[in-house]
Amino acid sequence: MDPNRFPDLSCRDLLDLLASEERVPAGGSSAALVVAIAAGLVAKAARLSRSEWLEAGGAVAQADTLRARALSLAQSDAVAYEDALATLEGIENVKPDRRDAAIQDALIRSAEVPLLISQTACDVSLLAADVAQAGNPALGADAGVAALLAEAAARAASHLVEINLATIPEDERSARGEELASKAKTAATRALAGAG
């Protein structure tokens, strides 16, 4: 599957692809797509808040940017994951004295995109909290749902970072992923309080 086709797939085709026997897309791409959906909800809530919130236009622009970034990360994650799997499957073709380094490099590369997904998810959750608090109260529930979706995606992506770096415990990216997931959770709590 060519990840560059993601934006052109129907929702049904994308879900069928996720459920298929294809290796990609997988968990990281799924998390990124959830972030894109959450950013779309934030953009909707902000767009429909323009009449009562002066900063709604800025929130719309941020949400649209985050949505595009998340979609791009879904594609990037599929490529990075496929590359890591290919490296691990072909490890016997690597000189024995380079194998450990090749495996470590593949795992590090496969952790970098999920960390970016977690960062983007955190940003969406924070923006959703702002929209829930300052935007149209009638759309506070949508902003709250967006924050919860983004929080879940941040946690999922952080989990992938941790899994990919399990053999490299001194790598600070695992802690950074956990920090981003925690910030997203705090923002989601704020969004739900603001949506009420």
Image (cartoon, grey):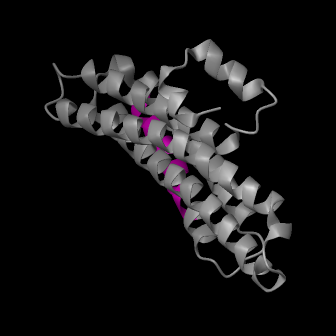
Residue 19 in the image: state x and y as whole percent. Answer: 77, 25
Residue 128 in the image: state x and y as whole percent. Answer: 39, 37
Q: State whether the magenta stretch is mostly helix, strand or loop.
A: helix
Which range is magenta?
A: 179-196
Which quadrant: the N terminus?
top right
Q: Is residue 15 at all visible to an observer of this figure?
A: yes
Front one among 123 and 191:
123
Does the stretch in magenta take in 185? yes
Front one among 64 and 133:
64
Q: Is residue 149 at all visible to an observer of this figure?
A: no
Front one among 68 and 82:
82
How many numbered marks are there? 0
Front one among 140 and 193:
140
The residue sitting at 27% across, 17% down in the picture is 48
The image quadrant that residue 49 belongs to is top left
The image quadrant that residue 42 belongs to is top left
Figure check: 61 above or below 97: above
The residue sitting at 67% across, 21% down in the picture is 15
In this rendering, position of residue 174 left or right of residue 22: left
Residue 166 in the image: state x and y as whole percent. Answer: 76, 69
Q: Residue furthest bottom?
A: 97
The residue sitting at 29% across, 26% down in the picture is 46
Residue 171 in the image: state x and y as whole percent. Answer: 63, 77
Does the stretch in magenta take in 154? no
In this rendering, position of residue 35 left or right of residue 99: left
Which quadrant: the C terminus?
top left
The residue sitting at 17% across, 35% down in the picture is 55
